[in-house]
Image (tube, rainbow, N blue to C red):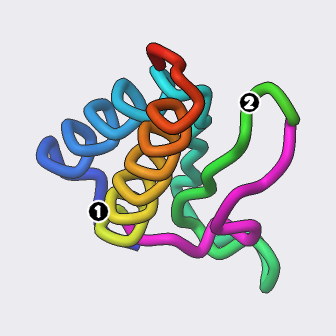
Amino acid sequence: MPALSPDYRKRVRRLRARATRRDIGVLTSRRALSPNHLGGIMLTDIPMNGVIAGGNFDLTIDEAERRVDELVADIEKRSLRFGGSR
């Protein structure tokens, strides 16, 4: 887990803003607390209250950004296919 540099915090804020618009939660953990809690990032589905990725807080910021970009692209593709605006 990288130190909480201003750049890291800025990236997490931007990731949260982008993800929240699509009902994706971004949870962070400052440090590893146990073997099943590794001190990274977890992505959740807000309406369903379920884990999308990083169930053990094991995503890095780069992995989380890539995963959110994939999820947003998939959501937009599905909404266009079904005629939605979101």
Depth check, front residue: 19 or 62: 19
- Give the prevailing secondary structure in the magenta stretch: loop
Where disc 1 sits, the SS reads loop
Q: Mark 2 falls on what kind of element?
A: loop
Q: Quadrant of residue 11?
A: top left
Q: Residue at x 51, y 38 (%)?
A: 81
- Residue of label 1: 3
The tag on residue 46 is 2
In screen coordinates, is 34 left or right of 25?
A: right
Decide: marks 1, 2 in contact (CB < 8 A)?
no
Q: What is the residue that sits farthest to the left in this orientation?
A: 7
Residue 74 horizontal/vertical position (percent): 48, 51
Q: In this view, does 25 lie above or below 43?
A: above
Where, quadrant-wise, is the N terminus in this rendering?
A: bottom left
Q: Position of residue 31 (x, y in %)?
A: 56, 64
Taking the spot 80% from the left edge, 26% from the top edge, the residue there is 47
Residue 30, given in percent of the width and then of the height, sits at 52, 54
Q: Which residue lies furthest to the top in this view?
A: 85
Numbered circle sitting on residue 51? none
Find the distance from the CA under tag 1 to the CA under tag 2: 27 Å
**1 or 2: tag closer to the N-terminus:** 1
Q: Does the magenta stretch include residue 11?
A: no
The answer to if 58 sits in the magenta stretch is: yes
Q: Over which residues does the magenta segment extend?
A: 49-60
Say what amino acid the circle numbered 2 marks.
Ile
Q: Residue at x 45, y 14 (%)?
A: 85
